[in-house]
Amino acid sequence: MLNANSKTNILIVEDEEKIARLLADYLNQDGFKTCQLYRGDQVIDTLSKSSFDLVLLDIMLPGLDGLQVCKRIRETSNIPIIMITARIEEIDRLLGLELGADDYICKPFSPREVVARVKAVLRRFNLESNTSDKTADHDNLTLDEQRFRVERNGAACELTKVEFFLIKTLLSNPGLIYSRNQLMDIIYDDGHSVSDRTIDSHIKKLRKKLLTLGFEENCIHSVYGVGYKYE
């Protein structure tokens, strides 16, 4: 689970004040700081004057709609953005993501789901901040996030999305033990419910693929009763 603290600041942009207050209440209860805006044309100025870690951005806003706000934010910032919309047409969803949104949530929603999405996006953003789309990490292993592929000494191996983010997570902190629950929280950011033994299955397959690149089978080390670490 992500440990929210006083430095984790969420900007809520929602013209329905009751919804904005509800979201703020749930986020505050989980340890986040929040600020609420009810108009789209106030966002850019607010972001320029204060520091935020994530924006919850409704699409239907007075002054300036959420899609235009998202586009303007992306001109100067890579801050995580979660779009909130009551319009379920696929074009709106795709357009929001193409403009640079990191995730979207459709109304009506559970406030707990929003909190979970916020945590998941922040985890993913913090992980990606430590590694670029294509970076060499350890043992000459290069991660290519655009194609979910790993390369080493001229050889390449295709991974599934889950396998890719497993190795990326483990490589981000070599020697650090991740529990199965921690790995599930990072990998399954959509609230997907799976058995913790599902991680074991993915690790087993990942090890076999890394063997083809010359790694030892125990490079992903099992810690009995706890989880896994990269050594």
Image: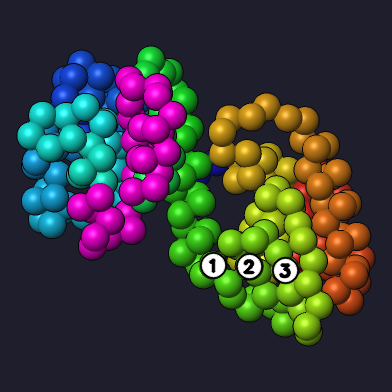
**Which sits in the foreground, 151 or 113?**
151
Name the residue carrying label 2. 144
Look at the picture and state if 113 lies above or below 171: above
Query: As displayed, is residue 69 above or below residue 16?
Result: below
Can residue 223 be seen? no
What's the residue type where badge 2 is placed?
Asp
Q: Quick check: is 80 in the magenta stretch?
A: yes
- Vertical comparison of 11 with 135: above or below: above
Q: Which residue is mark 3?
A: 150
Q: Residue at x 86, y 62 (%)?
A: 209
Q: CA distance from mark 1 to mark 2?
A: 6 Å
Q: Is residue 204 left or right of residue 104?
A: right
Q: Are marks 3 and 2 in contact (CB under 8 Å)?
A: yes
Task: Residue 139: name its quadrant.
Answer: bottom right
- Kindly identify the residue that appears in the image at 81 percent across and 47 percent down: 202
Name the spot of residue 27 as percent of width and height, x first. Answer: 34, 31
The mark found on residue 100 in the picture is none
Tell me where residue 75 appears, x and y as whole percent. Answer: 24, 60
Q: Where residue 97 sits: x, y (%)? A: 40, 44
Disc 1 residue type?
Asp
From the top left corner, tell me how far across and down residue 67 is, in percent.
26, 40
The crowding category of the residue bearing disc 3, from other C-alpha atoms within 10 Å (few below 14, some 14 to 19, many at least 20), is many
Name the residue nearer the viewer: 100 or 141.
Answer: 100
Q: Which element carries disc 2, helix, strand or loop?
A: strand
What residue appears at the point 64 percent right and 61 percent down from the top-left corner? 147
Specify whether 75 is left or right of 87.
left
Which element carries disc 3, helix, strand or loop?
A: strand
Q: Nearer the viewer, residue 140 or 151?
A: 151
Mark before the other along the chain sequence, 1 or 2: 1
Labels 3 and 2: the sequence-earlier one: 2
Q: Which residues are magenta?
A: 71-99
Q: CA distance from mark 1 to mark 3?
A: 11 Å
